[in-house]
Image (tube, rainbow, N blue to C red):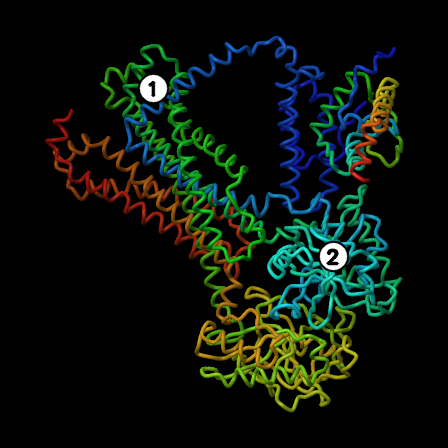
Amino acid sequence: MNASGSDQFLPLKPATFLVLLVLSQEELHGYGIKKEVALRSEHRIDLEPGTLYRLMARLVDQGLIEETDRRPVPDQDDERRRYYRITELGREVVTREADRMVQLADSQDVRALIHASGS
Amino acid sequence: MRRPPRHPHPFGDRVYRRLLGLYPAEFRRRYGDDMVEMFRDARRDSPPGPWSAVKRWTKACRDLVVSAAVMRFGGRRSHVPGSAAAVRSAGLLSTTTRSTIMEPLVSDVRYALRTLWKSKGFATVALLTIALGIGANSAIFSVVNAVLLRPLPYPDPDRLVMLWTQFPAGGDPIFAVSPAEYLDYRAESQAFADMGAYSVGTATSTGEGTAERIEVAATSASLFPVLGFGAHVGRLYTAEDDRPGTSQVAVLSHGYWRRRYGGADDVLGRSMVLSGVSYEIIGVMAENTQLPGATADVWVPLGYDRAQITDRSGHFLEVVGRLAPNATYGSAVAELEATLARWPDVYAGQHTPNPETHPMTLIALDDHLLGGIRPAMLVLAGAVGAVLLLACANVANLLLARGEGRSREIGLRAALGASRGRISRQLLTESVVIAVAGGGLGLALGKWGIDMLVRLEPGEIPRLGEIGLDASVVAFTATLSVLTGVVFGLLPSLKASRTDLAAVLTSGGRSGGQGHDTRRTLSGLVVSQVALAVVLLIGSGLLLKSFAVLQRVDPGFTPDNRLAFDVGLAAADYPDMETIMGFYDAVTGGVGALPGVTDVAVVRNLPLHVYSRQEGVQIEGKVNSENEGSYPIQYQGVSPEYFSVMGVPLLVGRGLDESDRRGGPVVAVINETMARTYWPDENPLGWRMDPGFARDIDWITVVGVVGDVRQTDLAATVKPEMYVSLEQVPGGFGWTRSASVIVRTDLDADALSSSIRSVVAGVDRDVPVANLQSLETVVAETLSEERFVMLLLAIFAGGALLIAAVGVYGVISFSVARRTQEIGIRMALGAPQGRVLGEVVSGGARLAAAGAGIGVTLAFLSSRVLESQLYGVSVRDVFVFTGGAGILVAVSVVASLVPAYRASRVDPNASLRTE
């Protein structure tokens, strides 16, 4: 296990990975996270409020994300919304997951598979 | 610090917030406001309309229930404060706990089966009632499921949106798009990942085998990725093929490939001739590939290049787009509005969409395809649900009455130590057993019902072909059965559990103190039954009356003793007006000479069919301020005999005649609506019109006015229309290569079919005779959907009436049976028979009147649901309302007569002796 214990969270489920990924790029509120996740998953992952906030609650409890008081564009935004950002631990977890996926994709087995299907 | 919301919550938000009560309190406190906010955001970005709301709510409810359930009960992984994870993990639900739950259930079911077996009469009646109710619901659910609920056959169908134009002056809610409009919008829009266009028409396929009329879809190559289409064999055409002047290629539909080519593998590279033009077959579409709302046998490239289009009008394309990944319906609409505001400047002086006279609109694909049928489906679903409720009420009645008889048994069980909850559960199990058995039988009935529905429905309802008894129908029926059992069993079981033990045991179980109470409950049930039945009767009465009005609508022509068939000529074989007219002359001459045929005419578009030619004309000396100066019209090409053969009356001036030929002055006969609308205070004869859309004709002179003919359907408003001789049609003679031939004859279609086919084949063996049918059939078909819905609702209303009558009969019988002794004493004291009879009947009538009053009120409040289904009838038609209530009261009185007669025949001595 690595020093910070980030490995205990791996592997991540696709929705968790995408939520952490979009939060690693910007601070967002719930609906913003939903839209970004939908965009990155080609609309295959559509997070409804209950599912999303259950996930968010877990990530907050695990210390992977946290609420923030900052508002990226104060004038244009609804001040009632709660924004979230990724924590250092969260960033480490999503990075390690990304590494893991890259390594997996780069493995001989996967290459052989892709080569065999001719794409 | 969180601030309170700035906007007042609309009703939906309040309901959503209430539903958040499903979650643990801590979670709700932390995230409730954000979830409501997110729900509101999603509403803002969704397409408008009730269906979109239904879908949003369905998704939201599923999400809430599932995630709340996981959090409360499933939460080994849950990290949410307040979840029950810790309790669960302590292993409280051990196997012993489970078996203590299961064992009494099994014994309850066994006991229920034994009791029901002992009272077979009751069990049979209850079973059949429930089976009928559930069977009808399964059948209707399978229709609703196939038509409305199942996703459209495209990947991610929720992201498909159709683009339409509009001409407010013309009266159509939506109109097709012109090639230039489509290509410009496709090039400019950022909200769509891509768009495709298509137009479906008929063509004559010749070459291999006999000639036949087939459906040909001309589509852009971009349509395939938008709708996710792929090839079964070979390839689909690409942007390279989809350009003007490239080689002609065609893709066969899977069905046509099997039908015409026997599924031959070597079809690729072969050539086929469509209306005289040769195409190379390059592929076969994947099976079950379907255009939105249309079918096609063969697919060919549309072949437009933006740079080569000079005319921006000519609307005939249907356009569908897939939203870009980061776009929503709302953002696409905003973009379209911005485009519309810009275009009048960009295309100044040319035909162009604009926000005022020629707007464009976006409609979600499923709203476009299914929006029309949704109200009818929901009405049917509501009606059949009401029938099930009625059936439940009847079985609850039976159970209550039976509970009276069983009070001694129940009292004994209680005396032996059974708790109230235990007794309630036992009785509830009995009703669920009845309901589940009824559900099984209902499923079989539902299967039969589905077959009947498919036979009844003549193909007007989209996707009905996909209907069937699949897993979701079975799951629906199973859920409904259990729910039904609970609904009709709950009341009797609760009542039984409140039995006064001492009273029951001391009275010998015959007449416990709850007799009056039970009678009141029974009466309440009957009143609600009557109310529901009245609502159904009024609903079906309204539809029936509307249907009768529609059937009386004058189509504007005489359909009796007329046949029609379609022909289509290949451009290569019929290159000019002379050859085309030569064909029609030969066919009308040949068919006219057949025995039994009195007259023959030719028309471009048969009435009561979709009408696509709508253009604008300038009227000399007039300016239409509403429509860029021009007057919207529809136009028809006809042979001179058309008006007399169809029985369309000539009102003013003359009809068309043999002198109205190509080269001569172009004349038109207009319909009454056009005369009244464009010349409200003048005589239209002699006025000249300039068809701006047709460069080959300068002026068209009005020479006559004929009666209105319904061109699209019986319920649609008639629009301004002009008739021009086939030889003089504006916009090029090519249009006249497709037409319908109308035959006036005493014989039916079957009798004339072969002789008509041989006449046409004698003129040209490559021209097939298509859609030979009587005009009466044409008229009847336009009402098929209305007939279907009306018939089903009438069947449900009939069922409801029957069930309600049985309910009234049961309650009155029950009350007479309980009052036998009282009646006996009164008769012994000299009460006349007639009075006893009158009292009992008026008891039934009072119940019915109360129910009818409630029913009329309910129907009055809910009648707007039917508004879209009605034509020429007010949703609050006094005749139908009083009739519906009157019928039920009358039927209830009749149903009370039998027990009343029984009561009046009570023998005072016998009734007193029984005590």
Residue carrying label 1: B499
Q: Is A41 in front, or is B212?
A: B212
B459 with respect to B617 (left or right): left
Could you tell me how many numbered marks the image carries? 2
Q: Quadrant of residue A13?
A: top right
On-image quarter of the N terminus of chain B:
top right
Q: Chain of mark 1?
A: B
Q: Residue furthest front?
A: B266
Mark 1 vs mark 2: which is more N-terminal? 2
Q: Is residue B249 visible?
A: yes
Residue A88 coordinates in the image, percent (x, y): 88, 18
Disc number for residue B319: 2
Q: CA distance from mark 1 to mark 2?
A: 68 Å
Q: Please tell me which residue is depicted at 47% across the width and 76% down the height of the picture.
A: B752
Q: Identify the amino acid type marked 1.
A: Thr
Residue B326 position within the rendered picture, expressed as x and y whole percent measured from the top left: 81, 41
Q: Which residue lies at the image location 52% right of the left edge and 68% below the top edge?
A: B778
Amino acid at circle 2: Val
Classify mark 2: residues with Cα within 10 Å, few (<14), some (14-19) or many (20+): many
Instruction: Tell me: residue B485, above or below residue B496.
Output: below
User: Neighbour class for label 1 at 10 Å: few (<14), some, many (≥20)?
Assistant: many
Tell whether B539 sits left or right of B24.
Answer: left
Residue B871: assigned label? none
**SS for tag 2?**
strand
Does dot 1 land on a helix, a strand or a loop?
loop
Residue B710 in picture, x, y percent from top left: 57, 70
Q: Position of residue B828 (x, y in %)?
A: 12, 34
Q: Nearer the viewer, mark 1 or mark 2?
A: 2
Report the residue at 46% width, 12% height from top: B100
Q: Quadrant of residue B623?
A: bottom right
